[in-house]
Each structure stands twice: as C-alpha cells, then as structure tokens.
Image (tube, grey):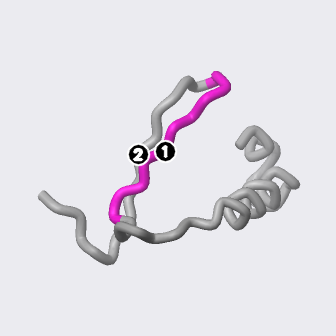
Amino acid sequence: MGIPSNRLTYQTAGESHGPGLVATILGVPAGLTIDTEVINTELARRQGGYGRGGRQKLE
C-alpha cells in the first residue's frame, strides 16, 4: 500500500525520557531541500512557551 502523493506521514523512535529521538518523514519528494534553520527556528519558538504549555520546552 503506497502513500498518497499529497500526504506526509511521520514515524518516531527513541527513548521516552532519553536524549535521542529519530524521526522519519514519508511522502517527501526526492531531492527536496529542507532548510534546517527554519525547523530550528520553529522549535525554538515552541520552546519559548508558544503553544500548549511547559512540556513543550522539552522538545
């Protein structure tokens, strides 16, 4: 069963309270450039308290 071309899915693996986390994103077109600075900026914004609550500071 394939993934529809207009849908992204992800899988995560790692320790619940450990230092490492792995994420696999499925459905991303081959050759797509991913700007890690944009991702890091969004993660920093969430850690700053924007969103649900204090638990997000662990992301």
Residue 22 in the figure: left or right of residue 52: left
Spot the residue most to the right: 48
Q: Residue furthest front?
A: 31
Question: Where in the figure is residue 37, as x and y percent of width and height?
Answer: 72, 62
Q: Quadrant of residue 18?
A: top right
53 lies above or below 19: below
Above or below 46: residue 15 = above
Quadrant of residue 6 in the image? bottom left
Q: Is residue 7 left or right of residue 19?
A: left
Residue at disc 1, secondary structure = strand
* Callout 2 secondary element: strand
Q: Which quadrant of the figure contains the N terminus?
A: bottom left
Residue placed under numbered mark 1 in the picture: 23
20 magenta-colored: yes
Q: What amino acid is at disc 2?
A: Gln
Tell me the amino acid under the disc marked 1: Ala
| Residue 56: image location, x then y, percent | 74, 46
Instruction: Identify the image quadrant of the C terminus.
Output: top right
Per the rendered image, the range of residues in magenta is 17-27
In the rendered picture of this protein, how many numbered marks are placed on residues? 2
| Residues at marks 1 and 2 touching, judged by CB atoms closer than 8 Å | yes
Residue at 23% x, 64% y: name it.
Answer: 3
Q: Is residue 54 above or below residue 3?
A: above
Q: Residue 11 bears which disc, if any?
A: 2
Q: Tell me where residue 44 appears, x and y as whole percent.
A: 80, 55
Query: Which percent across, then down, holds residue 58?
Result: 75, 38
Task: Judge the density around disc 2: few (<14), some (14-19), many (≥20) Cα neighbours within 10 Å.
Answer: few
Residue in the image at 41% along x and 45% along y: 11
